[in-house]
Amino acid sequence: MSSNIRAMIANVEVENLEDAIPLYQDLAGDAEVRRFPYRELEVALVGPFLLYSGPLEKYVSQNATVIVESLTPVLDVLGKAGAEILEAPNEVPNGTRIVARHPDGSVFEYMQPRA
């Protein structure tokens, strides 16, 4: 398993999540940090930034879903990063979602649950 961390939006590699999270908190204005597992990956959501560690090559061009409170900051950062929006914000049974392809080829779905 790789010890490198991939920042999905900024494409930065660091030694571990503990080193990466404070950097992205600064970028996101001291945003809330949420950590959770996704398959074999360890994932941290820092504001709109998605960081993960693990066997990264298995997940390029595969979908993962990230639950967020608001899609607005996610759209802002995806736009600045040059990500391709594959599916614009749309209503689905569980809330509102967008699907984006990040510059490294990974595809993620961001979901804002219904209130």
Image (cartoon, rainbow, N blue to C red):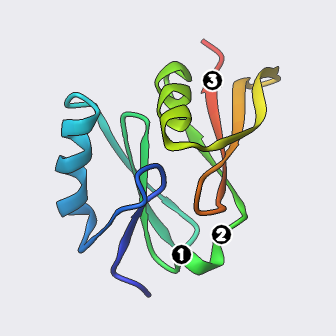
Q: Amino acid at mark 1?
A: Leu
Look at 79% across and 21% down and name the residue there: 90
* Residue in front for this viewpoint, 33 or 30: 30
* Residue in front for this viewpoint, 86 or 90: 86
Residue 14 quadrant: bottom left
Q: Amino acid at mark 2?
A: Val
Please tell me the numbered disc located at residue 60.
Answer: 2
Q: Residue furthest top?
A: 115
Residue 32 quadrant: top left
In the structure shown, which secondary structural element does the residue marked by tag 2 occupy? loop
Callout 2 crowding tier (Cα within 10 Å): few <14, some 14–19, many ≥20:
some
Spatial CA span between label 1 and label 2: 7 Å
Kindly check if marks 1 and 2 are in contact, taking CB atoms under 8 A apart as contact.
yes
Residue 37 % position (x, y)? 48, 60
Q: In this rendering, is residue 79 above or below 71?
A: below
- Indicate the quadrant containing the C terminus: top left, top right, bottom left or bottom right: top right
Where does label 1 land, which residue?
A: 56
Residue 71 % position (x, y)? 56, 23
